[in-house]
Amino acid sequence: MENLWDSRFKDKEYVYGTLPNVFFKNTIDKYNLKGKLLLPAEGEGRNAVYAAQKGMDVYAFDTSIEGKNKAMKLAQGNQVSINYEVGDFFELELTNEQFEVVAFIYAHFSPELLPIYHKKAAELLKPNGMIIIEGFSKNHIENQKTNPTAGGPKNLDMLFSVDTMKRDFPDFDIIKLEETEEYLEEGKFHNGKAKLIQFIGRKRV
């Protein structure tokens, strides 16, 4: 049976666009982030390529080989190099690395996996390392009724809240944590008004 994400990513079109996520880009730029970056569920590579253009050492992964293929093509077209593996978080060689930055951009998982993945990411960060997360808020469920093209999981348990981040990252100093409403323009699957959770945290020494 074909992987859902392989099915979505196999089109020539980059379904979330080729430009980086705005929150991710702005955070990288504002804090002048450097070093090794881990990007779980990176899909077609738009954020990985931007970070590589900024000089970061990028390690990305996804469960979709089609996503990797497009990410590598995008990297080649932009004349940058990225490391990209296909597989499960706990089976990948890249998890032997230690990172200055980890970013989850619309990386929604089942409620039983989410805290485990977030804990693993926290462990992979060096002290003083930074976590960047943007994803759909639990309150986005209401938005989906009037803005169905904005995207996001239809399962409330897979959506985020401020409390989700406080629960999963207790050893982090909060730089930014808020629910916000934005108008997304990220390809054909993120288009419209969306309620989001944005989190930037720094791992305590």
Image: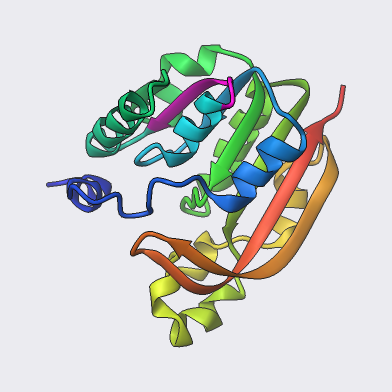
Dominant SS of magenta comes to strand
Q: Quadrant of residue 90?
A: top left
Asked whether residue 167 is drawn in magenta, I would say no
What x and y, as percent, mark residue 41? Answer: 43, 40
- Report the colour scheme: rainbow
User: Residue at point 46% right, 53% down?
Assistant: 110
Left or right: where does residue 153 sit relative to residue 170? left
Q: Residue at 51% x, 18% y: name it.
A: 95
Quarter placement of the C terminus: top right
Count of residue discs: 0
Residue closest to the far left: 1
Residue 5 location, x and y as percent? Answer: 27, 48
Q: Position of residue 8 (x, y in %)?
A: 24, 53
Report the residue at 14% width, 46% height from top.
2
Answer above or below: position of 107 versus 194: above
Tell whether 182 sits left or right of 192: right
Nearest the eye: 70 or 152: 70
The residue sitting at the front extreme is: 78
In the image: residue 82, left or right of residue 31? left
- Name the quadrant containing residue 67: top left
Q: Position of residue 29 (x, y in %)?
A: 69, 37
Foreground of the two, 177 or 96? 177
Residue sitting nearer the eye, 35 or 61? 35
Q: Where are the magenta residues, as a range?
A: 54-61
